[in-house]
Amino acid sequence: MSDIDPTQPARTLFFEGNALFEAGRLEEAAACYQAALALAPGRPSLLANLGVTQCRLRQWPQAVATLTQATQADPTHRDAWVALGLSQEALSRWSEAAHALQTGIQLGAVTGQLWLSLAMCRMRLQQPMEALHALDQAVAVEPTLAEAWSQRGSLMRDTGRYAEAARSYEQALANGGDETLNRFYLSSVQGGAAPAHPPSLYVEALFDEYADEFQTHLVEQLNYQAHTTLLAPLRASGQRFERVLDLGCGTGLCGR
């Protein structure tokens, strides 16, 4: 707050925004911070609070733009770095997210969940050793963080360390991790009978992870051509239609 002149109306708006933020009225809080910034442009605390609010509102591109300004104006603003990292992660910008999260952690934002977020970015960047370090930090800070144990198990499994993977999955189960999912993982490293069907959470996570690259992989690498083959006779006929219903549209290749 020291970067805001106490004689300015911006200070009043700043405090009003803080009160609205604490009350969970995030849209109104953002409006207050924006009004304050119009009166006191470039103030780091205003930029940081607005960016954090935009992050909470899941307004990721706006949050990144605001928080980038905030961290440039005050490179020691821990909360701004953390929110910037989480916003970049939400936009699948793994390298930028990892840098921002690492900076926030170095500035003192040490929680198991932040270490877990950093680990997930490192895994996306194909940095298994760095990911393992972050996961170890996550469970050291918060030993009951089931998701960190589960992710650690998967990392151990992928590197062939099955006994360590099993121990991690058991810790995930002991700390309230999803029973069906972690037992499915556990069976994969203990040589037991595999379930007849994978858990729905596993399938959902697999498809969610693949979603961003699915169409590119399908068309450019697998040379998928069914959509062009299907539409070729229709296009050749020269017929025009006011409305089209695309059943089972998938990513919308036919629609385009």
Image (tube, rainbow, N blue to C red):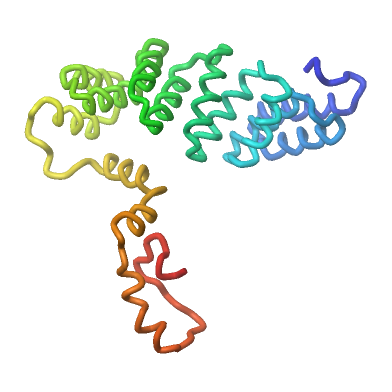
Position above or below: 232 against 2: below
- Seen at 37% across and 61% down, the residue is 250
Q: Locate residue 44 relative to residue 238 in the image: left or right.
A: right
The quadrant in which residue 183 appears is: top left
Task: Please count the marks in the image.
Answer: 0
- Seen at 45% across and 88% down, the residue is 238
Q: Locate residue 152 relative to residue 85 in the image: left or right.
A: left
Specify the farthest residue to the right.
Answer: 7
Q: x%, y% of residue 175? A: 30, 19
The quadrant in which residue 255 appears is: bottom left
Q: In front: 218, or 27?
A: 218
Q: x%, y% of residue 167? A: 21, 17
Q: In front: 112, or 173?
A: 112
Quarter of the rendering occupied by the N terminus: top right
Q: x%, y% of residue 159? A: 22, 24
Position above or below: 76 against 13: above
Position above or below: 64 against 98: below
- Seen at 58% across and 13% down, the residue is 107
- Seen at 19% across and 42% down, the residue is 198
Q: In front: 20, or 76?
A: 76
Q: x%, y% of residue 208? A: 37, 45
